[in-house]
Amino acid sequence: MSAVTCELCPRGCTIPEGAAGDCRVRVNLGGKLRATTYGRPSAIHIDPMEKKPLYHFHPGSPVFSIATAGCNLHCLNCQNWQLSQRGGEEMEEIYRLDPPDLVRAAQGEGCRSIAYTYSDPIVFYEYVYDSSELAHREGLANVFITAAYINQKPLRRLCRVLDAANADLKAFDDGFYRRVNAATLQPVLDALVTLKEEGVWLEVTNLVIPTLNDDLALIRRMARWIRDALGADTPLHFSRFQPQYRLRNLPPTPGETLDRARREALDAGLRYVYVGNVLGHEGNSTYCPSDGTLLIRRVGFLIAENRLTADGRCPTCNQVIPGVWQ
Amino acid sequence: MKTETERETTAMKQRRHLLKALGGLGILGLAWPGVSRPAQRPRELSLKEADFYRPHDLAG
């Protein structure tokens, strides 16, 4: 019997022959590790870029979004658990869409970018890499929506073909990661730094869950770490929790909690702090950090008004607003 | 003479037995609406070799 050790994520599963890793989709067949969902997405949608959420990258553009089954995390609050907590063979819908077909489909739908999203695209790494390489050749951008629980070597390689990422920082607390996500904090922090170092446009999301990670001191530490390690221009999204999957006992995040979290992060020196999953909140929009001018007004995922200049500056004070605007 | 509650209990037991029997048919692979597996579930998964792994000799 020939086992293999998967070196893709920090979990480092040792997988006996015929079995799958913890992610359910990387399987040892005959002593070789197989990526069983390569070219086999189970979710295909066209989303606005704001849904990822990416607020400083191609605003208002449609993005061809795919995911396969499986995930290397097991978050108690997963909003896509029907997809993420299953193996490919358990899915009722599984499409065949190899990288050339995926790129053609995105082009055919008029999308300028492809998002690898919904579950964690780390577990369909090879599919992401090959598709992204091809997409680049065809002039499309690649965006990666992830919990960033990945080893350094595969991440560095992947960064060559990524243009933007939104990475979850689920809490600035290793105990939270262990209890709620079945993961650990440090590899995630390392991955975020690497994404930044490698020049991938990075935005960070923190889902605020009542009683579990809504402590303001924790949020302050997280915001300071982002400021120091990733830069004050890194957009941070505080997202509202909705009860689901195995955390249905908790209420949705109160608006005041999100307001306080946003204030804390702004006070820590972050310049672009957003509130998500709350329709009409002032934190949905982008403001100039110099003079407070409203630059991009969002209503849900829609861009109601975009006042940025063509080269990404504030129209009143000429402040450069970091992002990939074209 | 059975009371209303006793009649309900009997009906529930019968329903449970019936469901068990139908479940048994499902295990035998006989389709039954709403009980068995979905009629069509594509299972053609990929055999693409993964990029980051190493052989690990359990015996060694």
Image (cartoon, rainbow, N blue to C red):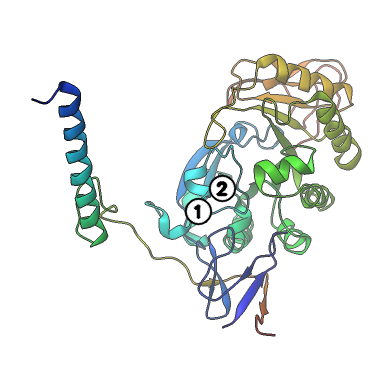
* Residue type for callout 2: Ser
N-terminal label among 1 and 2: 1
Could you tell me if the residues under marks 1 and 2 are in contact, i.e. CB atoms within 8 Å?
yes
- Pick the residue in front: A168 or A186: A186
Give the residue pinned by disc 1: A69
Along the horizontal axis of the image, is A200 left or right of A83? right
Answer whether residue A96 is visible to the viewer in this image: no
Residue A129 in percent (x, y) is at 63, 61
Single out the residue that lies furthest toward the front.
B1
Q: Residues within 10 Å of mark 2 (few under 14, many from 20)?
A: many
Whole-Å distance between the Cαs marked 1 and 2? 7 Å
Residue A81 in percent (x, y) is at 51, 43
Q: Which mark is residue A119?
A: 2
Answer whether residue A22 is visible to the viewer in this image: yes
**Image quarter of residue A134:** bottom right
Circle 2 marks a residue in which chain?
A
- Pick the residue in front: A201 or B36: B36
Q: Which mark is residue A107?
A: none
Quadrant location of the C terminus of chain A in the rendered image: top right
